[in-house]
Image (cartoon, rainbow, N blue to C red):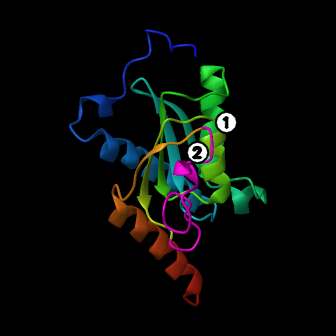
C-alpha cells in the first residue's frame, strides 16, 4: 500500500489519549452532514497511519441509491486515496453498527479494525444480529470495538426518527 506523503500532517486525534473517541467525533460530523439532505444520520471515516483517508455520510435518500451508505462512500474514497482495494492497516469508524452490506464490504476490503458507536439491534452485523466481521469461516476478520460515543450517536439517530414521526 502506498504511504501518504510526508507533507500530510498527522490528524490531531493522534495526540489524544482516546483516539477512538476523537475519530468517532469525526464520524459524527459526517453523520450530521446527512441530516442536511434528509438522510439517516450515519457517518464514517477511515484512518490509515494517523490520517483520515476516507469520509462518508449516508446519501440513500438524496441520491436514491441503495448503496449510498456512509461506510461504502468512505471505503471507496480510502481505496482511491491509497490506490489499492486492500485496506489492510486501516480502521473504519462509523456511528452505527454496520448492516450486512457494509460489514461485508469491510471484510472484502480487508479493513483491519472496526470501531462503531451505537449498536443496531435490528440490522447490526458486528455482533447484534449477526457477527459477519468476525465470522471464522471467512478468510478475513476485523478487530471490533463497539459502543464508542454510543450515547451521542444513538441520540442523533433517535432525534432524527422522532422528527419523522412528529406531525409538522
Task: Judge the density around disc 2: few (<14), some (14-19), many (≥20) Cα neighbours within 10 Å.
Answer: many
Q: To which residue does mark 1 refer? A: 76
Can you give x and y, in whole percent of width and height, for residue 22 in the image? 32, 43
Left or right: residue 124 compared with residue 114: right
**Residue plotted at (52% across, 47% down):** 44
Q: Residue 50, position in %: x, y?
A: 39, 26
Which element is circle 2 on?
strand
Residue 149 has which mark? none
- Residue drawn at x 64%, y 28% is 79
Q: Quadrant of residue 78?
A: top right
Determine if residue 69 is in view. Answer: no
Q: Nearer the viewer, residue 137 or 74?
A: 137
As drawn, 168 above or below 40? below
Is the residue 153 above or below the residue 89 in the image? below
Residue most extreme to the top: 6
Q: Residues within 10 Å of mark 1 (few under 14, many from 20)?
A: some
Q: Which residue is mark 2?
A: 56
In the image as oriented, which residue stretches furthest toward the front? 137
In magenta segment, residue 44:
no
Distance of mark 1 from mark 2, alpha carbons?
Answer: 9 Å
- Figure quadrant of the N terminus: top right
Q: Of 107 and 54, which appears nearest the observer?
A: 107
x, y percent for residue 62: 72, 59
Magenta stretch contains residue 133: yes
Q: Which residues are magenta?
A: 121-139
Q: Residue at x 48, y 69 (%)?
A: 157
Going from N to C along the chain, the mark reached first, 1 or 2, is 2
Q: Are marks 1 and 2 in contact (CB under 8 Å)?
A: yes
- Front: mark 1 or 2: 1
Residue 161 lies in quadrant: bottom right
The kind of secondary structure the magenta stretch mainly shows is loop
Amino acid at each position: 500500500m502506498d504511504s501518504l506523503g510526508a507533507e500530510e500532517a498527522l490528524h490531531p486525534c493522534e495526540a489524544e489519549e482516546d483516539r477512538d473517541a476523537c475519530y468517532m467525533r469525526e464520524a459524527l460530523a459526517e453523520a450530521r452532514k446527512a441530516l442536511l439532505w434528509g438522510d439517516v444520520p450515519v457517518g464514517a471515516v477511515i484512518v490509515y497511519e494517523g490520517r483520515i483517508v476516507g469520509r462518508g455520510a449516508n446519501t440513500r435518500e438524496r441520491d436514491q441509491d441503495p448503496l449510498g451508505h456512509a461506510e461504502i462512500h468512505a471505503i471507496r474514497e480510502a481505496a482511491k486515496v491509497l490506490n489499492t482495494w486492500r485496506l489492510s492497516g486501516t480502521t473504519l469508524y462509523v456511528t452505527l453498527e454496520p448492516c450486512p452490506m457494509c460489514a461485508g464490504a469491510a471484510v472484502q476490503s480487508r479493513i483491519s479494525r472496526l470501531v462503531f458507536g451505537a449498536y443496531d439491534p435490528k440490522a447490526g452485523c458486528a455482533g447484534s444480529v449477526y457477527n459477519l466481521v468476525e465470522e471464522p469461516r471467512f478468510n478475513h476478520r476485523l478487530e471490533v470495538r463497539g459502543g464508542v460515543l454510543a450515547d451521542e450517536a444513538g441520540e442523533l439517530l433517535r432525534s432524527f426518527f422522532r422528527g419523522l414521526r412528529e406531525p409538522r
